[in-house]
Amino acid sequence: MSEEEKLLKEAKKLPWEDRLFHKNWKVRNEANIDLASLCDSIRDPKDPRLREIAPFFKKTVADSNAPVQEKALDALIAFLKAADADAGRYAKEVCDAIVAKCLTGRPKSVEKAQAAFMLWVELEAVDVFLDSMEKAIKNKVAKAVVPAIDVMFQALSDFGARVVPPKRILKMLPELFDHQDQNVRASSKGLTLELCRWIGKDPVKSILFEKMRDTMKKELEAELVNVTGTAKPSRKIRSEQDSEPEHEAVSEASVPGSVEESVADTPQEIDEYELVDPVDILTLLEKSGFWDGVKATKWSERKEAVAELTKLASTKKIAPGDFTEVCRTLRKLVTDVNMAVSVEAIQAIGNLARGLRTHFSGGSCFLLPTLLEKLKEKKPALTESLTQTLQAMHKAACLNLVDIVEDVKTGTKNKVPFVRSLTLSWVTFCIETSNKAVVLKVHKDYVPICMECLNDGTPDVRDAAFSVLTAIAKSVGMRPLERSLEKLDDVRKKKLTEMIAGSGSAVSGGTSTATVQNSVGGVSSTESMQFSEGSFVRKSAASMLSAKRPTSAAPANKKGASVKSASNKKVDGAGRLETAKLTEPPEDIEPAEMNLEEIESRLGSLIQADTISQLKSALWKERLEAISSLKQQVEGLQDLDQSVDILIRLFCAIPGWNEKNVQVQHQVIEVVAYLASTATKFPKKCVVLCLLGVSERVADIKTRAHAMKCLTSFSEAVGPGFVFERLYKIMKEHKNPKVLSEGLLWMVSAVEDFGVSHLKLKDLIDFCKDTGLQSSAAATRNATIKVLGALHKFIGPDIKGFLTDVKPALLSALDAEYEKNPFEGASAAPKKTVRASESTSLSAGGLDSLPREDISGKITPSLLKSLESPDWKVRLESIEAVNKILEEANKRIQPTGTGELFGALRERLYDSNKNLVMATLSTIAGVASALGPAVEKASKGILLDILKCLGDNKKHMRESTLSTLDAWNAAVHFDKMVPYITSALTDTKLGAEGRKDLFDWSSMQLSGLGEVSDTVLLLKPAATAMMDKSSDVRKAAEGCIGEILGVSGQEIIEKNLKDIQGPALSLILERVKPYGSSQEPIESSKGVSIGLASKTNTKVAKSTSNGVTKHGNRTITSRVVPTKGSRSETMFSIQDIALQSQALLNVKDSNKEERERMVVRKFKFEEPRIDQIQDLENEMMKYFREDLHRRFLSTDFKKQVDGLEMLQKALPSFGKEITEVLDILLRWFVVQFCKSNTTCLLKVLEFLPELFDSLKGDAYALTESEAAIFLPCLIEKMGHNIEKVREKMRDLTKQIVQMYSVTKSYPYILEGLRSKNNRTRIECVDLVGFLIDHHGAEISGHLKSLQIVASLTAERDGEIRKAALNTLATGYKILGEDIWRYVGKLTNAQKSMLDDRFKWKVREMEKRREGRPGEARAALRRSVRENGPDVAEQSGEVSQSVVSGAIFARKLYGQPDSMERHLMPNMLVGVSGPTNWNEAMDIISFGSPEQSVEGMKVVCHELAQAINDSEGSLMDELVKDADRLVSCLGNKVAKSFDFSLTGASSRSCKYVLNTLMQTFQNKRLAHAVKENTLDNLITELLLWLLDERVPHMDDGSQLLKALNVLMLKILDNAERTSSFVVLINLLRPLDPSRWPSPATNETFGARNQKFSDLVVKCLIKLTKVLQSTMYDVDLDRILQSIHVYLQELGMEEIRRRAGADDKPLRMVKTVLHELVKLRGAAIKGHLSLVPIDMMPQPIILAYIDLNLETLAAARMLTSTVPGQTHWGDSGANNPTPATNSADAQLKVFLFFLLLLEL
């Protein structure tokens, strides 16, 4: 072993300090290597060894030995990678050592030093790093300065301006611009360009350019052109890297486009104001003599003094200070008599505002009144400076809209109109530059000011006021202006509406931003990967300069030429060829200027000198001879490619394009065309030289053909895309219109020759639209239309989307042209090809025809965030913004960036606002159409969410969904949609109507397809749907199966038949059999299940050959026996198969009423006893099928879950069966609630909402017994210890409360407040708050229960106290201070807590603009006082809309369906109630029953006033509205009674009946009611008289009396003819849909019988007084109604009914008999409305003749006075005993009818 080795070995035993500073360099070298290895092995940044070795680096990196220094830098790098931010304490000393010793060393050492600096930045020691850089750039050795600049450049490029502050770098740069070394200057320029990428060009220019030399400025200006877009950081600091895994986890769990991602991707906006240092101008102002100057008597001295202030204040940033005296002085100077001084002072104020910003707010408020007053001066210079200064004060945030309200009010009241108008113009500017929140806060102050100014006598003031209102509408929408608009006259309202519409008042949700692009100097993704791997890639700041960037030109030295990247070595030949093409320098297309002498010198001996001299001749013949000779010489040239450029230049010079002789022109054009078509590579700059001249020759008819051929040759040489692009500008700017029109005609031929693959279609279409179609010359427009027609041949209908804004006349002409050029698609092959290889890369059309726009820059984070806004209007605006983006992109977009958009739109598909969901569906359809086939990958499975919208019960929603599916199908082939459709059809939440629509839609799409294998996936869900409860679904599924069989191959169907069962299998076999399909595999596959089923139970019906067992008329699918599992499980399943033929529920012997009588109705929950559980088991075994009750009663929770799933699947097919055993099921659910198994409990909670939804759909309401069984347990168990279970129970409770009755459910909830479980009490308290907020009117009688809630505020548990306080705060919101009456006695501490919470609630309500607590209740009371005493009993509830609708609501006749869906206007639901008759009518029509009471009060008040009006004018007005009033009230009768039947107060019923009573008490009003309205009203009243539920309602007996009295009043005062006609028509059987849902098992026939009896009673009452009311009736109408009734029955039915003693028929005969008796033979004169000439003869004529004969024989006919024009009563005509006898007979007859009824 040598001495050296011994030394090294011994040295390893020494401490680190001795080794690192050993005198032997090899020992130090080894020590640094070992130190680097040690640091690499350390994984914990808190390792104490790191702290031990950290102090050594300040000396090791300064080692005098270069190799040792390199190893020391390696060790430092390893240390910095292992350490954390705590290592920053050593940064200063180490960085200073590196700056002093390493930056001038070997290149490798410099690179490692830079890497170490970057790691210090990564460890957040940025300030130390920049301090070191400040020292480094002052180094006298330029070699050390360049690496320092480079490392700053790289730090800024990698970490961004957020980590590396640009302000400090900006301070260093000025001294570098004047450095004597050119490399330093180049690097500083590169660093400046990088700063421009991060903070923008303008801030850099304003800060640095004033400190540069002119030469440097010019160089930088030239380089700034190449800096595009903004930059993003590619490297993170260590703290961000450590938190990166956490962020990744969050981003994976969240939707695409999360907040963190969007924030990171958003370029940082840096204000230039923050980059500059503040300047203290107060000190400079003192030195300038400002104070003496402003006091001078000469205006010029004052102006100079103020100008000095203006100059000083023009600095970017002014240091804050005391500017009070300055403001006072400026205020005086603004009002100076000399205008120049005044203008200068105003400008100084503007500069101060810009420089001080918020620090000048006090001064701005002080000066504002003076500035506004000064607006009265009409000097333009003064007005302009005032306007700029006022705008600057607002823009610099010195003033805001809140601060200036009072000053604006003063300004608008100024006597000078100019002040008023300019003040309002400034307000407009302030509103337009303020954010929405500020405008929302202050618009209430400004709108009244503007409304007042609209009445100003000066037009300018009115216009300015209109502008302010327009700006407000544009910022916050139309709502703030709605009430104000109502006060305007039509002219002003129209003008304001037009201005708002013209300004585009809809606020766009997204703003367009530029696409972020990295410049050449940016960091690539590969380099960022290398950082993560630990290597360092050195980058030079000078590389940002265009001259320093790598190009494909020849390298400067051999070494540079030999350098190859590792990646290039791995690329194959094709890759190298492609790379070579990409790196080839772009062709120079702009020709340099060259005079004729230079051209001749370069031609040399190429062309004969005589020929050139002849071309210059003035004689055309000599020129023609010369050009012919030249043509021959050119054709004889061998190496033509080398001479093309100079020859073209020669032709352009002599004879040139201004040649007047046509023959010479022809020859020149031919030679140029020959060169273009013959040369191997025709330069583009030659085309540029010739294009203007050739295009002018195209305009000349003599040279047109030759010139067009020349252009075609150019297109073959360089591609039509380049020729078109150059022609656009020439044709657009040329003065000769023929150049444009004929050029367009050449374009038509070019499109037909070359197609569209080489054209930039967007540019061509824009040129045609903006230039060609806008031309005033008809020839140009026609040529443009031909161009677009030619494009249509290749592109198709997609081109129409780019021409939507063209005039209608032109559109019709375009449509005609499209018909001449139909779309040929791929068959439209181009006739000519392009020789130039690079031209093929211009393909912007091709197979995808038109270009697609990248909208990723427009899908901004703000747009995505606003799509999730809690305000539905903002969400709608955002959806409209997306539509606008699609319109701007001509509905053709790229998939880039649409992933986040689809994610945001998916959330809106579940929006609570259905209108927004439909708008979202429409937008998704638009996005799908715009994306085309790419939508499948970009949409991220949103199609499944779209299909779920078919589960909505609204028809409009389903239609919108189907429209979206149509658009999706147009973009993506149907087979791509099949998996999603299959999944949707298996979703139980889809609903019957949704499944039907989806099957129908699928059938429609399948009908037009060829053979598609994937569609067989639809076979299984379609087969399942064949057994659906809904016949419509079954029919639709059957049609879909037929279409599936048509498009799927026979083999594929046979393979998938094993999963098909039931009726679908028979259908498929029947359809497939004619095509030769074999059934043997199917039968054999089903044989196992059939055999087992028959062996197990011989009583099971015989199985059909299709494997389907039949039971009665129901078809049930048999199940296949599983082959795995234990024997007991196998036998269990076999028995299940045998039981499939039986009904799941056997309710034949069920006696539900008896069971319910046994239920003990208690509010408090008690655990089920053993005997109760035993009874439950017995009943389940009795009424449930064996396999079902076996599962329910099993001790294995998995079996219980299976049982629930069985019941869940069968739930849609149940009818009354489930309601018959509902009490048993609820008791079983109670038992499960009491058990501890969470899986089963969750399954129960999943099943119960579906069960109650099903019951609600069947119009079933829980009985009191069922509620007593289940509600106590549910309330008690709401306090479950698992949050998910509590949440489900909470939702279930709300569902049951709304379905059962809020009033009846409330006591159960109150009992829960006394529970021992704290969580239960918290849930119940929250539930009480929910009911107060949403159902306050229904629980108003239970408000004393708030004492219980208030008592909970004294509990120890903080959560209970918090919940109680929140509930009481909700009560305070509704009741106001009245709540203290209900909370009982409280301690001072409790009162204090309540006071604090109530104050908090007031603040919350003010923020949300919800008014004051208790305002609704107070407004209701005021309305009662103003509208007189109540006509029905007062209930004292809070006036609040009740959301829950009536369970037994039925369709109202005479009222359109849309009325039910009509939204009530906002003014109707206001707390102040209706203020006039029209508002009252609206609230009656559209409001809820409780709300309509307020409207009825107003109506009653108006009726009372009209009746007491002696003049009768009020009554005349009301008579016009009488029919509308009765129609509204008639429709409201059913709603009011239905509402009361849910358990609510009968108050609204009393009001509606009372209002009708008051209406019909007045004969004028009663007579104004139309027949149709009377029909609806009488029908409704009679139906409710018969309803058995009315007596059980609140005050039911009083309601029945009121109904009877009202009916009598209608018969007395309504128009008699209408009453007769209506009642005779009602003798027909009533439509079943008009009846309420039957409460009993009574048939509709029995109900109709009762109804007819009531109608007969009413007719008897009218007939009794017919003799005295003959003058009041129209006999022709009555006889017509009798005729119609008899004709509808027919003689056969009349004879049958006569034998059955039918009361309706008998009543009609009685009415006819009475009429004949009273009118005698004259009755035949009233048959004008009866077709007496019809054959066979009307039945009524026979009855009239029979009555005349019978009455004549009995001498009971009333004689008619001869010549009488109007019939009189019988008493007047024949006062004989016969009349009395007839009256007596009628009375006897009617009495007989009543006896029969009894």
Image (spheres, rainbow, N blue to C red):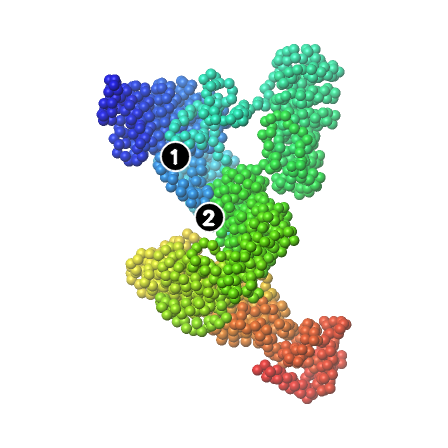
> Is 1638 on the left-hand or right-hand side of 1623?
left
Q: Give the x, y percent position of residue 1588.
A: 52, 73
Q: Residue at the location (43% across, 30% down)?
A: 527
Specify the quadrant that holds the C terminus.
bottom right
Q: Quadrant of residue 1514?
A: bottom right
Q: Residue at x 58, y 48 (%)?
A: 1052
| Residue 664 position in % (x across, y down) | 73, 19
Q: Is residue 1709 left or right of residue 961?
A: right
The residue that label 2 is drawn on is 869
Relative horizontal placement of residue 1500, taking residue 132 as reference (left or right): right
Q: Is residue 537 visible?
A: yes
The residue pinned by badge 1 equals 236
Could one spot residue 24 in this view of the protein?
A: no
* In-front residue for pair 736/1219: 1219
Indicate whether 1690 appears above or below 1404: below
- Please name the residue shown 74% across and 83% down the image: 1749
Q: Quadrant of the N terminus?
A: top left
